[in-house]
Amino acid sequence: LAAVGRHGGALEYASDALRADADVVLAAVARYWGALEYASSGMRSDRLFMLDAVRKNPDAFEFTSLELRDDKQVALAAVGSVGDMLRLVSSRLRDDDQVVWAAVRQCGDAMEFASDRLKHDRGLLLVAIRQFGDAMEFAAPELKRDPTFCLEAVQLNDEALEFVDAALLNDPEFEMKLARVINHDERGFGVVGGVAT
């Protein structure tokens, strides 16, 4: 137990009995999530064990069984700490408001893995864009053409401008409104002829 507590990868060299001992494996996972690779085969399918493992080290979600990737409580434990883990949850949970909101609050670029339905959720997208402007890339196409939404997004994070629909950028009325909301800071960021500079 002391060895895996210091270096989780030491579980690879442990006896079969130690690889099947939940306390030993959890101590290893706390140090190194990849130690789960060396745990006894049934542990990755054991809901309570994996819930503990993911709470100790959210990256342990990488080793959860397909069945547990569809378990909302296990998924929330993972995405609430490492939003990018949304990429590993079941398609059903990628469409679950609570799971996706938890992921996006933690990591805006998790929006990439949200369901198509949630890529239409203005509020969710704006939370993502505030943190990570490039999350605008994952917005539903009609939102990228929506002047009101696009102005809000750019006001939150000017990096979102890159993903605004080109036709909208060429609209003189939108361009004037956009010029009012863009932050003209020391970088000299602005819009000229519909192109970000």
Image (cartoon, rainbow, N blue to C red):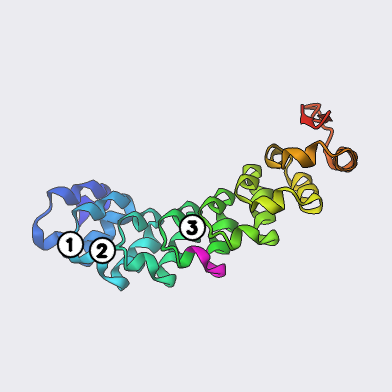
> Considering only vertical position in the picture, is 152 above or below 76?
above
- Is 96 inside the magenta-drawn segment? yes
Q: Residue 44 got which mark?
A: 2
Quick one: label 3, few (<14), some, or many (20+) residues within 10 Å?
some
Instruction: Give coordinates of residue 84: x percent, y percent.
Output: 48, 51
- Is 173 inside the magenta-drawn segment? no
- Upstream in sequence: badge 3 or badge 1: 1
Question: Who is closer to the viewer here, 86 or 121?
Answer: 121
> Considering only vertical position in the picture, is 39 above or below 67?
above
Marks 3/1: CA–CA distance: 25 Å
Q: Are marks 2 and 3 in contact (CB under 8 Å)?
A: no
Q: Mark 1 is on which residue type?
A: Ser
Position of the C terminus by quadrant: top right
Range drawn in magenta: 94-99
- Upstream in sequence: badge 2 or badge 3: 2
**What residue is rendered at 90% in x and 42% in y?**
173
Element assignment for label 3: loop
Quick one: label 2, few (<14), some, or many (20+) residues within 10 Å?
many
* Outermost front residue: 167
Instruction: Give coordinates of residue 111: x percent, y percent.
Output: 56, 53
Which residue is under mark 1?
41
Marks 2/1: CA–CA distance: 7 Å
Q: Mark 3 is on which residue type?
A: Ser
Which residue is under mark 3?
81
